[in-house]
Image: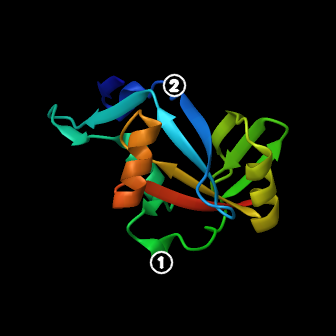
Amino acid sequence: MIEFVGRIEDGMPELEAQAHAWLAGPRSPAVIYTHQLTIALMDDSGDVSDSNAVLTRARELGWVETSDYAGWAAPRPGWEATLNGEHFLVRQPDGAAWYDGTLPVSDAWRAAVQQTGHVFHFTAATLDVHAITEQIASGQALVVVSTLT
């Protein structure tokens, strides 16, 4: 994992996320996002003011910890996803793209998302997909639920 430390005024580097389809259960289509870059922000005195700006931004957009089941039991207004072939686009409530890239999925995953009409999105402060699934189970990952349009 690469770490970027800087001031917000200096501009943010391009964040390359990878999306991994995960079928957590027969009716639980999910995507796990891993980030190759951790972005830490400094204040004017040079102290770290935010140790993971990506997760902070996710929280600002409505993502909650997986331990807060009531906070993610239903789709979050404004979060929408579309899947055309392997092209996957996720829009956050302000209309900006959260993810715009490929997502190879199984027939079972595609059937589950068509049946439920929503997608669970997970991320955490780690690069390893398997470590994120452990963090999901322990309540340390972040999650938001979108509708599939």
Q: Is residue 55 above or below residue 145?
A: above
In this rendering, does residue 106 appear at all?
A: yes
Q: Nearer the viewer, mark 1 or mark 2?
A: 1
Q: Residue drawn 32% across and 25% down?
A: 3
User: Percent x, y for residue 128?
Assistant: 42, 34
How far is the residue under mark 1 from the one under mark 2?
A: 33 Å
Q: Amino acid at mark 2?
A: Glu
User: Percent x, y for residue 82?
Assistant: 78, 49
The circle on residue 14 is 2
Q: Residue drawn 36% across and 32% down?
A: 39
User: Percent x, y for residue 104?
Assistant: 73, 35
| Callout 2: SS | loop
Which of 48 and 9 lies nearest the eye of the viewer?
A: 48
Location of residue 41 by image quarter: top left
Q: Quadrant of the C terminus?
A: bottom right
Which of 122 and 76 lies nearest the eye of the viewer?
A: 122
Of callouts 1 and 2, the N-terminal one: 2
Determine which residue is flagged by label 1. Answer: 70
On screen, residue 43 versus residue 85, left or right, reads: left
Q: Residue drawn 44% across and 55% down?
A: 142
| Callout 1: SS | helix
Q: Is residue 111 above or below residue 89?
A: below
Location of residue 1 by image quarter: top left
